[in-house]
């Protein structure tokens, strides 16, 4: 595979520690999703949701021309759940909701299905994570 971009991040202290991109451009204090300490921060599932949402929305913009589609606007919301499977392992669960302006419902579904085949996050999780795609077609909305 030809690598177009590479980055790295380091976490210390796990879910109650700190994570930072190794070039120093961004970092977060972390708190577990069951945080009751009052400590402010974010959790890894929130960071994953943000990255997946941005990547999926970008994938739609990338594939739209190949399908002859021109959505006016789009937004992607990724809901990330975490739970424990019957075998004791932990797993993620995803709801990916895409709102599209300027397309019919049929065309929006085609766009989303194609984006789901090329999005790196979708490819990384396919077969490993339960993911559901949802589509909303609107006349106009503010981003």
Image (cartoon, helix red, strand yellow):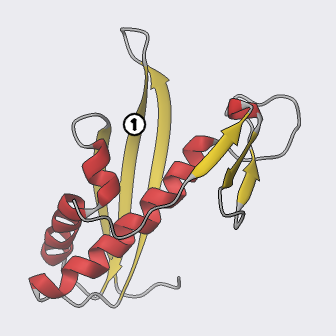
Q: How many badges with numbers are in the image?
A: 1
Give me the residue at 60% from left, 42% from top: 44
Relative side of 107 to 8, left or right: left
Image coordinates of residue 119 in percent, x first then y, are 28, 62
| Image height of 141 relative to 81, above or below | below
The picture quadrant where one finds residue 62 is bottom left
Where's the N terminus, which quadrant? Answer: bottom left
- Image quadrant where residue 2 sits: bottom left
Residue drawn at x 50%, y 53% as measured from the top left = 49
Q: Is residue 14 above or below residue 18?
A: above
Farthest residue toward the right?
38
Quick one: 114 or 2, which is closer to the camera?
A: 2
Q: Residue at x 38, y 48 (%)?
A: 95
Where residue 75 sits in the image (x, y, percent)? 43, 73
| Circle 1 residues within 10 Å: few <14, some 14–19, many ≥20 | some
Res. 77 visible in picture: no
- From the viewer's perspective, tell me whether residue 39 is left or right of residue 124: right
- Secondary structure at numbered mark 1: strand
Q: Position of residue 3 (x, y in %)?
A: 32, 64
Q: Which residue corresponds to mark 1?
A: 93
Q: Quadrant of residue 6?
A: bottom left
Residue 14 place in picture, x, y as percent: 68, 31
Q: Residue at x 41, y 68 (%)?
A: 5
Relative horizontal placement of residue 90, taking residue 12 as reference (left or right): left
Residue situated in front as seen by the camera: 42 or 95: 42
């Amino acid at each position: 595979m030809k690598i177009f971009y590479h980055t790295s991040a380091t976490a210390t202290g796990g879910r109650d520690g700190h994570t930072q991109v190794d070039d120093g451009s961004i970092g977060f204090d972390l708190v577990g999703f069951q945080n009751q300490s009052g400590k402010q921060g974010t959790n890894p599932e929130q960071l994953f949701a943000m990255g997946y949402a941005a990547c999926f929305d970008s994938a739609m913009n990338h594939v739209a021309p190949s399908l002859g589609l021109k959505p006016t606007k789009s937004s992607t919301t990724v809901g990330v759940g975490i739970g424990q499977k019957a075998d004791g392992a932990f797993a993620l669960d995803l709801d990916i909701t895409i709102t599209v302006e300027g397309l019919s419902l049929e065309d929006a579904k085609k766009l989303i299905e194609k984006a789901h085949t090329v999005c790196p996050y979708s490819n990384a999780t396919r077969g490993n994570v339960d993911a559901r795609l949802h589509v909303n077609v609107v006349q106009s909305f503010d981003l």
